[in-house]
Image (spheres, helix red, strand yellow):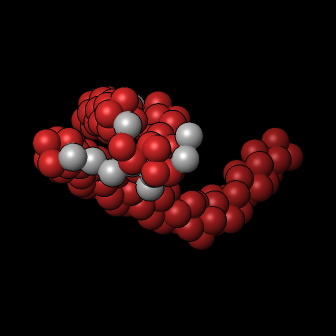
Amino acid sequence: MSASTTARDPNAQNTLLDRYETLLSSVIHMHELANTEQWAELIDQRTNYVVLVEELRELDATVVLESAARQRKAELLESILEHDVEIRRRLVARRDELGKLIGVSQRQRDLHRAYAPQQGAGVPYAADDTDASRSS
């Protein structure tokens, strides 16, 4: 179907709006995953989301919407963006949380490295004391 045919096709307009609704459903699901801290599944869904966005971009470039359809598209986009902002907010909070955990882990590792040689040095002396008491 050529761009000019698609632009006038009411079915193409419905298809485009249906894709925006599918994208909205996807982003709502991702928002729920972020709220329940299901990070691995959220990342998997994000891949699907990116594919949907790319397909939508290609379709959107070929379809000219009538006034009512443009209004519906604007409403869908607004809702999609609101959910996306909340997902990003949750992801930034998670990133910050992980950063703090990594910092704590690195400090613990550094402390272990700093004090482990001293702890290990005490063990041979204890063995020397035991050997000394046996020979007495």
Question: Along the line of sight, which residue is nearer the eye, 45 or 75?
Answer: 75
Residue nearer the viewer, 67 or 18? 67
Compared with 20, 123 (above or below) is: below
Q: Position of residue 109 (x, y in %)?
A: 57, 60
Eyeballing the image, is 26 above or below 117? above
x and y, in percent, of residue 119 in the image: 63, 58
Q: Is residue 118 left or right of residue 80?
A: right
Q: Quadrant of residue 134?
A: top right
Residue 28 coordinates in the image, percent (x, y): 27, 33
Q: Nearer the viewer, residue 135 or 50?
A: 50
Residue at position x 36%, y 43% from top? 8
Q: Quadrant of the N terminus?
A: top right
Q: Residue at coordinates 77% horizontally, 55% vertically from top-left?
A: 124
- Image location (x, y in percent) of residue 18: 33, 30
The one nearer the camera, 108 or 80, is: 80
- Relative placement, left or right, of 65 versus 120 is left
| Residue 10: quadrant of the picture | top left
> In screen coordinates, is 103 left or right of 91?
right
Q: Residue at x 44, y 55 (%)?
A: 61
> Would residue 54 be visible to someone looking at this image?
no
